[in-house]
Image (spheres, coloured by chain):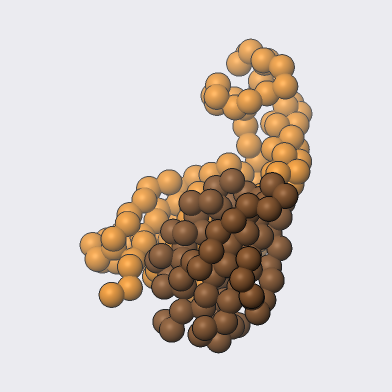
Chain colours: A brown, B orange
Amino acid sequence: MSNFDVELDASGLNCPLPVLKARKALSSMSPGQRLLLIATDKGAEKDIPAFSNITGNPLIETSEKDGKLHFLIEKGEG
Amino acid sequence: MTKKVAIIASKGTLDNAYPPFLLASTAAALGFEVKIFFTFYGLTLLTKDPDLKISPLGNPAMPMPVPIPSIVQIIPGLEWFATWMMKRKLKQKGVASWQELRDICVESEVELIACQMTVDLFDYNSEDFIDGISPGGAATFLEFASEADITLYI
């Protein structure tokens, strides 16, 4: 996983908390900064790309590590 | 153009508290403008600290540890048990409490509209409700819903 500025561990949290927490974290970040979001909610696999697509915060990378989903999201200009 | 979501919340059980607040808080996180119109039993969801319950009665799809015939479900305490079981499960599975989702709705400026007709019908007072709700009627909702991209009746 590439470099990130903020890490958010949403392991154990269920829908819609990973999305809500990602939103909160991104709102205090500057455009271009990157958020590493870790989640165990299986729904996040589709929810985070949808969130990223709608809010204009590009999803840079997705991977799975130790059974957890890792999302690297860049704060957009919007 | 900001997307708009219009929701009617008409039910006041624990399970029915989730869909309006969950979808509204998520929609707000996606940057959508959201209004929820609370009517009839949905008004309970706007009161300060309601003890919401879930009833297995008339709900054959509710998973129970052992099958309980409908006639037995009128026994006092069974509703309490079903509610306790549901709350425990929600916690175990890392699901937010409905109050948490309601707080997020308020923080993210989801407009919570109390149907004035049912407020009067059930003799609610403004101090029964949480802060920041606005009263409204059918035309208030329909005006917003007519411009909404998503409209839901729950």
Would you say B52 lies left or right of A45 here? right
Q: Is residue B20 above or below residue B16?
A: below
- Say which of B73 and B62 sits in front: B62
- Say which of B12 and A2 sits in front: A2
Residue lying farthest to the front in this orientation: A2
Residue B91: give x, y in percent of width and height: 74, 47
Residue B35: give x, y in percent of width and height: 41, 65
Residue B27: give x, y in percent of width and height: 45, 63
Determine which quarter of the picture holds residue B124: bottom right
For the point 29% across and 66% down, which residue is it?
B144
Determine which quarter of the picture holds residue B70: top right
Report the quarter where the N terminus of chain A lies: bottom right
Would you say A55 lies left or right of B107 here? left
Residue B147 in sight: yes
Residue A18: give x, y in percent of width and height: 61, 59
For the point 28% across and 75% down, which residue is it?
B1
In this rendering, the count of numbered labels is 0
Report the quarter where the C terminus of chain A lies: bottom left
For the point 59% across and 46% down, which residue is it?
A42
Residue B50 in sight: no
For the point 62% across and 32% down, which residue is it?
B55
Residue lying farthest to the bottom in this orientation: A30
- Say which of A40 and B120 sits in front: A40
